[in-house]
Amino acid sequence: MIRIKELSADLKAQIAAGQVIENPASVVKELVENALDAGATAIDIILEKGGTHRITVADNGCGMYSEELSLAVQPQSTSKIATVEDLAQLLSFGFRGEALASMATVAAVTLASRVAEEKIGSQLTVTQGKLGAVTQVGMSPGTSVTVTKLFEATPARKKFLKSEATEQKKILSVVVPLILVHPEVAFSLIHNTKTVIDVPAQTPEERIAAVLRLHSGVLFPFEYSDQHYTVAGFLGAPQLANKGSHRQFLFINGRPTHRSDLAKVVKDAYGTLLEPRSFPVFILYLTLPQEMVDVNVNPKKDTVTFYNETAVRTLVQQAVVEVLEREDLHYTSHGQGFEALLRTKTMEPVTASVLRSDIDPWTVKDFSLDDSAEILQVHNLYLIAQTSHGIVIIDQHAAHERILYQQFLEAFEAKKSQLVTKVRPQVTVTLSTEEFAALSEKQAILQEMGFLLQFLGDAIKVKAVPTLFSGRNFTELFSEFAADLLSDREISELDSTTHRTLAFLACRTAIKAGEPLAQDERRRLLEKLFSTKTQFTCPHGRPVYIDLEMHDLHKLFKRIL
Ligand code: ADP
Ligand code: MG
């Protein structure tokens, strides 16, 4: 008995198609890549219902002759490679000649195209693999591809499509990287008649500003090469880092790619400049000889491997460290670097001035104590004192900073729900569905905290906030609140911006490393430090003092073992 049989041609085609086309986002990705391959300088994307109803991608590229239309939708037909060597030298996006054929198997595809030297264009519709007739159509040079009835003939697949909002999100996550890496091309994206993106041809900086809303002041451009490779791009200032990886972009030879290991290399290079579980912003363009890259590993072409993985990781790591050092942001230049980064964006003028007006920062200078027990200051940096059980070595700047941080924190706690400021004009914040749901459950608590909010369908209208939070980026603030709730914590009002503002105030007000201190000033610093609630680490995580017990000293000198 023979139980194994060959699948029908139809079924084979469906299965193959499923590997390339899994959702509206993969349709959009393939169509935009084709338009880019066709040399388009303007690409318009029109979506209905998250692309589940209709997707149109129109370009002004080289177009196709009418006889080419039916070839374009044949499997393994492509104008992009002809020989095996071409495959190795793969430079264009498409190469398998599979995308249009796959779409034509699982959807209805209408191709309309005109080459510049023809006066009229031609059009062809293929529905679930069945070719229609080629007709003439008036159009300007270029190509327009419309995909409807996606997965209509395969209800099992259609069931896997998510909500309109989720599919739109997935589309954006494939389109945004392509838009970023092609600033020379004008793009528009319209969803359900609403314009989501509309950008002319731009410089890379302009494109980043327009799409990611990140401006040059908080992005550090760089270019770093060695013999074979170049890594260039932009690193975000540490304070831009947030809880998600959606502002991390990696392009390898112009191709959007995801490599979590390289993202980690970047994150690690930021070191202590970043809070734990935050994701630095980066846009990296990695260029290496095509023969050292292997992209042909899966049909969607979005994973890339290299022949020398270690070399690539080292290059990226060195590049990032170098930029952070150049910008004086590296953790080896901690004190000054930390200030430099705080100065740029996290200083919240309102928060700072409310706190400043309310507290008279305690200073070392106006204190005197006549006690003869000596405290040693070494290199105007560390203080050494005898304790009941041994000695203590104190970092004078870190210690003062810790004390002041605590003071500013107490002022913040006391002030935070006392004053409420109206938000004028009112601000509307849109969050992810999850975040929105989490916050709307806690409306009462937010109101107690002093936030007057109106929860609309999927957005929050901010009407009034505690004065200490006015002028804030509410999207960031609320997504932090939501993150707390989503990980089953209470809302922490000490959000990261507040924390950084307090740390900034403390850092600026504190005595510096390198400042000589008189004997009584040293004493005052120590006394205050040891009466401060949390005295162990400075606001950015470094130790404030090291306590050596006699026992430890004896061990060091091998008096005891
Ligand atoms: P591939 O891109 O891998 O070649 P596709 O199925 O995506 O395969 O496209 C098949 C062929 O159709 C392409 O090689 C190209 O010649 C032609 N084509 C597709 N889209 C366009 C377009 N927007 N403009 C011009 N030609 C196109
Ligand atoms: Mg293609």
Image (spheres, rainbow, N blue to C red):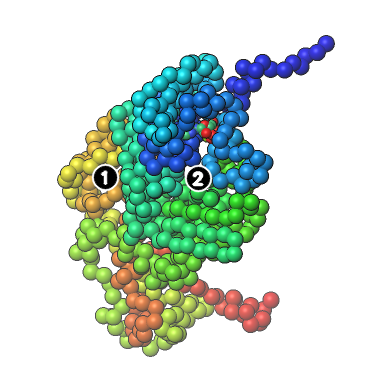
The residue depicted at 38 percent of the width and 33 percent of the height is: 141
Q: Nearer the viewer, residue 344 or 485?
A: 344
Observer able to see residue 490: no
Which amino acid is tagged 2? Answer: Pro
- Label 2 C-beta lies within 8 Å of the nearest ligand 2 atom: no
Q: Return the residue found at the far bottom.
A: 372
What is the quadrant of the C terminus in the image? bottom right
The residue depicted at 62 percent of the width and 59 percent of the height is: 311
Q: Position of residue 325 (x, y in %)?
A: 46, 69
Q: Nearer the viewer, residue 406 or 242?
A: 242
Question: What residue is shown with label 2?
Answer: 256
Question: What residue is shown with label 1?
Answer: 449
The residue depicted at 35 percent of the width and 50 percent of the height is: 202
Q: Position of residue 525 (x, y in %)?
A: 36, 76
Which amino acid is tagged 1? Answer: Met
Q: Position of residue 380 (x, y in %)?
A: 41, 83
Q: Return the residue found at the far top.
A: 1
Q: Residues within 10 Å of mark 1 (few under 14, many from 20)?
A: some
| Residue 66 in the image: above or below residue 197 | above
Task: Decide which of tag 1 and tag 2 comes sooner along the chain.
Answer: 2
Q: Position of residue 507 (x, y in %)?
A: 34, 69
| Residue 53 in the image: above or below residue 531 | above
